[in-house]
């Protein structure tokens, strides 16, 4: 198969082969062996290597195969397709033949590497080059921005004491790999309007591979005389195994620069200055990331870095609140009373479950009350309000940072382009109905309303089913907590013969139940996550979204709704339901009715906050540990083996396309999962942060590692992703706003109803002359006559501890505010209960209004787009219009001048004829 590889004004380069080393099963010859470049001169071919100005022909056996160029050393490889021969080779070979023929018709140039030249002797590699004509045509179609003038806006002046930040900065040539230009959408008809020094380097490799991929996804592989709409695009060819992979090339090995002076070695610079963990304290070279990987990946790392920077302030404030809890440890009178043998040791508590649970003394919860004080103190209220303001500052300052990046990366007008130009090939193929576009009046595919409604209903029903499945699993975990609590209580009772006496003195039944239930819940979360990912992708594909943006937004919404319920439902249960619907001795509430025997859980005398903290730490820390193992440890082992292979191969034999072929494929959902992981973490540190002020600190440490792990993966583990544009973080921004608003409500309810802060403050300020919390424990516990307890609620014979004597102990206590036995309103709520409830509701209203007022004021005070950026945008738009106007005027002048000179020259060549040309007299 001879491939025409390009045309110039001087010559037509035709790539030929001297030998045919092998043939495919369908008889199609595959070019192998030494290939020559012949040059045509006036139709005569001379058997000599074609040498373009400034380039030398490189012999195949002399050429360094660790190169990003064709064998001629001139044409850059913009994309690589790989494939192998298998039992279904005839059909696949036919598809490849048609597909490659259609690629050549679009103007792309191809070069094949035979399997005998590959490392495994099985894989063929098809190298693709886009010549200038193709790049210019599709750059015009895709409205690629190209520089037309150097920016005349002065750079910001150096900040005073800038030397302090130098250790955290990377070299200037890495931070700003390109000069600052004014740009305009490329127009092929106005090519001399733009600053073009070299056509080969005008479009960076990321833009080139984006253009080639755009062609690959829309190129058909059916014959000309048969139109089969479903036989279109590289994605289908990858799915049916015709090709095994499709990827653009990295420009060099990550641990050393390329020996080719034409190669930028940007991958090496990214690894050296960004992907190594030792660079964790340095800023990210975002402009180089954008230039190498594209705007979509660049905006992700910009957001992740900004989020990590803002976490520093939240982490410092959370650490201060925690330190306050530690320093006020000795002033905690409530815990002292619980631990005092003469106070807490004399208070007998009612059984916490039926039959298996015995009476117990209050001082058995001494340790958990001290632990609870670390997080349930006066600093909790302040920190909850601080986080409500912090999240607003984070979102508002990110909008400003994002607006600056939109301008610097030429994304200001990208939204309309994305809607118009990024229609998914799947939508074009599956939608057979067409109608005129309301704006362009051109025919375009669309999905009928009836079909859209049916798909939406099926999608909604599927999502609802999986959410209900999560709720059912949570109910199962709650049932486990209720059933197992009795077993732990029976094992840990105060018995001199107990083998777990030491453990029982350190771990209460509540803590043991909470820890084991949290671990089981985390395992269920991971299993449901794995299953739902495939379901979410399937139902999103079934909806057939029109654009890539719409597809991502739909998938994002579905996945986050599921993940929200999956990760946070157990925390919501502990925070807002556990201990709230217990009843009281003689009238307990049961989860599934009294017949189930599963009595609703009670909180410890110090409240449920420590259990919420336990749940949050296990789920949040467990998720981060599992994620880091998946992202870092497993790829590290794979990288160790791959590095050995890559470093032991000489560059002359281990080609650049083979090296990248051995890397992991970066899927279209790769970035989606990175965002999802961080947004779930954002929910943990905002929705429930009042229960665990150290959560931002854990997130900060995780994110410092996450930035470098992600950078290391992109640089060393993944094939180079196809560059894609994005002006913002998409639907994730709206999700963050919703979580931010919800976090104010959840934290207000946690402080009011989950912690013990409000009852303590009410006690302190409603008892005249009471300057301390002395007597609070006795005040917060109600009395019940043991003789009035129903037989079904009494402990079984032998369950009661040795110190319990029914003749001397006639009452037990429980956590509530009710009248004692013998009172005319015995066992009904006291007035203090209603005072506390009113105080809780008042606190929620006040906190929410204060935080929301501050949030809206801050949002109003901080503009989304900096004034400097607005001025630059206006300046650039003005210059584009002015330069285009001047360009059109000059072009028109040149055309008129040429037309006039041509007409004058023609007139001078004609003989003068007095009969035809008469000069009129002046008086006529």
Image (cartoon, rainbow, N blue to C red):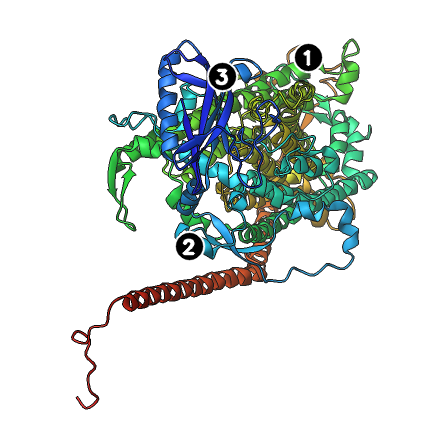
The residue that appears at 42% across and 21% down in the rendered structure is 239
Name the residue that disc number 2 marks. Answer: 190
Determine whether 13 is above or below 921 in the image: above
Q: Earlier in the sequence, mark 3 or mark 2?
A: 2
The residue that appears at 46% across and 55% down in the rendered structure is 192
Q: Nearer the viewer, mark 2 or mark 1?
A: 2
In the image, which disc is placed on residue 595?
Answer: 3
Q: Earlier in the sequence, mark 2 or mark 1?
A: 2
Determine whether 576 is above or below 797 in the image: below
Q: Quadrant of residue 268?
A: top right
Q: Position of residue 544 (x, y in %)?
A: 35, 33
Q: Earlier in the sequence, mark 1 or mark 3?
A: 3
Can residue 71 be seen here? The reply is: yes
Task: Judge by depth and name the residue closer to the eye, 366 or 547.
Answer: 547
Label 1–label 3 contact, CB within 8 A: no
Q: Quadrant of residue 135?
A: top left
Measure the C-alpha gap from mark 2 to mark 1: 92 Å
Characterize the local packing of mark 3: few (<14), some (14-19) or many (20 or more) Cα atoms within 10 angstroms: few
The residue that appears at 46% across and 63% down in the rendered structure is 883
Task: Judge by depth and name the residue closer to the eye, 312 or 379.
Answer: 312
Q: Which quadrant does the N terminus fall into?
A: top left
């Amino acid at each position: 198969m001879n491939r025409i590889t390009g045309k110039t004004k001087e010559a037509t380069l035709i790539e030929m082969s001297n030998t045919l080393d092998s043939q495919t099963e369908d008889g199609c010859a595959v070019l192998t062996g030494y290939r020559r470049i012949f040059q045509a001169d006036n139709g005569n071919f001379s058997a000599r290597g074609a040498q373009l100005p400034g380039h030398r022909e490189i012999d195949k056996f002399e050429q360094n195969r660790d190169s990003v160029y064709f064998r001629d050393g001139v044409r850059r490889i913009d994309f690589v397709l790989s494939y192998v021969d298998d039992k279904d080779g005839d059909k696949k070979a036919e598809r490849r033949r048609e597909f490659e023929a259609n690629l050549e018709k679009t103007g792309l140039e191809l070069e094949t590497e035979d399997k005998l030249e590959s490392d495994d002797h099985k894989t063929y590699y098809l190298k693709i080059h886009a010549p200038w004509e193709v790049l210019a045509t599709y750059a015009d179609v895709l409205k690629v921005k190209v520089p037309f003038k150097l920016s005349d806006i002065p750079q910001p002046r150096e900040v005073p004491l800038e030397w302090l930040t130098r250790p955290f900065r990377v070299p200037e040539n890495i931070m700003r790999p390109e000069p600052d230009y004014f740009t305009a959408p490329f127009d092929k008809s106005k090519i001399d309007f733009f600053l073009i020094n070299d056509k080969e380097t005008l479009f960076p490799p990321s833009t080139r591979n984006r253009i080639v991929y755009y062609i690959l996804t829309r190129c058909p592989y059916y014959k000309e005389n048969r139109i089969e709409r479903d036989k279109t695009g590289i994605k289908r060819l990858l799915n049916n195994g015709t090709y095994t992979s499709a990827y653009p090339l990295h420009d060099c090995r990550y641990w050393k620069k390329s020996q080719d002076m034409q190669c930028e070695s940007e991958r090496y610079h990214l690894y050296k200055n960004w992907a190594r963990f030792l660079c964790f304290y340095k800023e990210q070279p975002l402009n180089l990331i954008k230039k190498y990987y594209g705007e979509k990946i660049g905006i992700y790392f910009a957001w992740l870095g900004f989020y990590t920077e803002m976490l520093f302030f939240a982490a410092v404030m959370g650490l201060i609140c925690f330190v306050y809890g530690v320093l006020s440890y000795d002033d905690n009178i409530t815990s002292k009373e619980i631990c005092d043998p003469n106070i807490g040791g004399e208070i007998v508590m009612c059984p916490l479950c039926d039959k298996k649970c015995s009476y117990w003394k209050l001082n058995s919860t001494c340790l958990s009350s001290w632990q609870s004080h670390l997080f349930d103190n006066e600093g909790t209220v302040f920190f909850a309000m601080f986080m409500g303001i912090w999240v607003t500052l984070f979102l508002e300052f990110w909008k400003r940072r994002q607006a600056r990046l939109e301008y610097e990366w030429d994304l200001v007008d990208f939204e309309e382009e994305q809607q118009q130009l990024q229609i998914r090939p799947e939508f074009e193929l599956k939608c057979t109905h067409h109608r005129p576009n309301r704006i362009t009046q051109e025919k375009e595919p669309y999905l009928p309303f009836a079909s859209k409604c049916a798909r939406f209903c099926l999608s909604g029903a599927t999502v609802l089913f999986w959410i209900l499945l999560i709720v059912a699993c949570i109910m199962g975990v709650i049932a486990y907590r209720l059933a197992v609590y009795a077993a732990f209580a029976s094992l840990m009772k105060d018995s001199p013969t107990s083998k777990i006496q030491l453990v029982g003195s350190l771990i209460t039944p509540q803590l043991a139940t909470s820890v084991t239930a949290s671990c089981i819940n985390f395992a269920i979360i991971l299993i449901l996550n794995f299953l739902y990912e495939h379901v979410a992708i399937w139902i999103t594909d079934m909806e057939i979204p029109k654009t890539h943006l719409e597809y991502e937004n739909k998938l994002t919404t579905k996945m986050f709704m599921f993940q929200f319920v999956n990760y946070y439902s157990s925390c919501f249960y502990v925070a807002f339901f556990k201990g709230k619907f217990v009843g009281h001795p003689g009238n307990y509430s049961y989860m599934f009715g009294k017949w189930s025997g599963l009595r609703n859980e009670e909180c410890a005398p110090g409240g449920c906050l420590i259990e919420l903290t336990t749940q949050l730490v296990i789920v949040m820390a467990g998720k981060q540990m599992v994620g880091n193992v998946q992202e870092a440890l497993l790829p590290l082992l794979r990288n160790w083996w791959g590095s050995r292979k890559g470093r032991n191969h000489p560059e002359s034999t281990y080609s650049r396309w083979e090296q990248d072929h051995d890397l992991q494929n970066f899927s279209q959902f790769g970035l989606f999962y990175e965002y999802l992981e961080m947004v779930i973490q954002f929910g943990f540190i905002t929705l429930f942060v009042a229960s665990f002020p150290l959560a931002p600190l854990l997130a900060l440490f995780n994110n410092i590692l996450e930035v470098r792990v992600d950078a290391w993966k992109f640089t060393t583990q993944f094939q180079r992703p196809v560059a894609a544009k994005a002006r913002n973080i998409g639907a994730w921004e709206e999700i963050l706003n919703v979580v931010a608003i919800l976090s104010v409500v959840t934290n207000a309810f946690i402080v009011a109803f989950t912690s013990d802060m409000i009852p303590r403050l009410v006690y302190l300020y409603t008892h005249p002359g009471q300057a301390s919390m002395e007597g609070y424990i006795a005040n917060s516990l109600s009395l019940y006559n043991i003789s009035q307890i129903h037989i079904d609620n009494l402990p079984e014979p032998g369950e009661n501890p040795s110190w319990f004597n029914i003749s001397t102990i006639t009452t037990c206590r429980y956590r509530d505010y009710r009248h004692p036995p013998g009172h005319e309103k015995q066992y009904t709520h006291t007035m203090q209960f209603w005072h506390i409830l009113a105080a809780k509701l008042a606190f929620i209203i006040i906190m929410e209004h204060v935080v929301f007022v501050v949030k809206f004021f801050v949002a109003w005070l901080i503009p989304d787009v900096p004034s400097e950026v607005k001025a630059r945008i206006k300046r650039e738009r003005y210059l584009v219009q002015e330069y285009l106007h001047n360009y059109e005027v000059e072009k028109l002048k040149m055309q008129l001048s040429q037309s006039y000179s041509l007409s004058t020259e023609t007139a001078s060549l004609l003989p003068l004829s007095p009969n035809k040309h008469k000069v009129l007299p002046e008086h006529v």
